[in-house]
Amino acid sequence: LVLILSNSGETEEIVSLLSPVKKIGAAIISITGEPKSTLGRHSDVVLDLGKIEEACPLGLAPSASSTAMLALGDALALTVARRRKFTKEDYALYHPGGELGRKLLTVDKVMRTGKANPVVRCDATVREALRVMTETAGSPGATSVVDKAGKLVGFFTDGDMRRRLPSNPDLLDERVEAVMTRNPKRVTSGHLASEALRMLRDYKIDQLPVVNAKGKLIGILDVQDLLDVGKVETEA
């Protein structure tokens, strides 16, 4: 489907496109002030602007006609959106860089997964947890802790280690489940990124583990990722 706009319907550049467009089997919808023009005759659907007197003092430069095309184009877009039951989520999908796209951006679009998602079993030592945190790409400075089934049971950060190490020289050899934060703050993959950022700020934390509907770990969200991409805005 090709939408073509031309008040006269005889613009050389547009007329030259009509044959190739027809050859590929595309339908043509035209917005024109001349339904019987070359463009109008080759169109499957003609949206007639009618006779429009340009606002230009010379009556030449597109002005009133271009404004009419804009209005008709908006009406067409809104009608199609209504007929297709176009949702805010659809809008965000096709317009991710806009304000609505930022507001509807979900955690799964920015979370870290795979090798960038640090995770240890609850029976791992703090030393092993520290190694995972250090070797993970992006150095998030934290690791999620899971049970044998992969469900999130805790969270451990380098800050936790620094606070405990002075009073416990044997900390590195302890099991991480003994020093981790149990029942940590978390989000699901479908959670709005803007809400996740608000949680990070409200609780003054830098990371959030991401789980699925069954509580299994699937990723980690780092505050720096949200700030770096410049896509997330929290509401005032």
Image: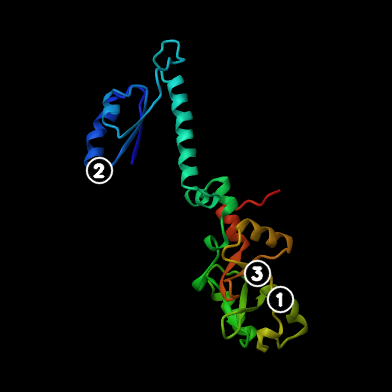
Q: Please identify the quarter of the rendering in which residue 165 is found.
A: bottom right
Can residue 97 be seen from the camera position used here? yes
Q: Tell me the residue at 44%/24% (across/down).
A: 66
Disc 2 or disc 1, which is closer to the eye? Answer: 2
Q: Where is residue 155 in the image (x, y as percent from the top left)?
A: 66, 76
Taking the image as shown, residue 150 lies to the left or right of residue 11, namely right
Element class at badge 2: loop
115, 189: nearer the viewer: 189
The kind of residue tagged 2 is Gly
Say which label, 3 or 2, has the lower sequence index: 2
91, 163: nearer the viewer: 91
Q: Residue furthest front?
A: 83
- Residue 25 circle label: 2
Can residue 63 be seen from the camera position used here? no
Q: Is residue 141 above or below residue 236?
A: below
Q: Name the residue under label 1.
A: 160
Element class at badge 1: helix
- Residue 186 circle label: 3
Taking the image as shown, residue 63 lies to the left or right of residue 141, namely left
Q: Residues within 10 Å of mark 1 (few under 14, many from 20)?
A: some
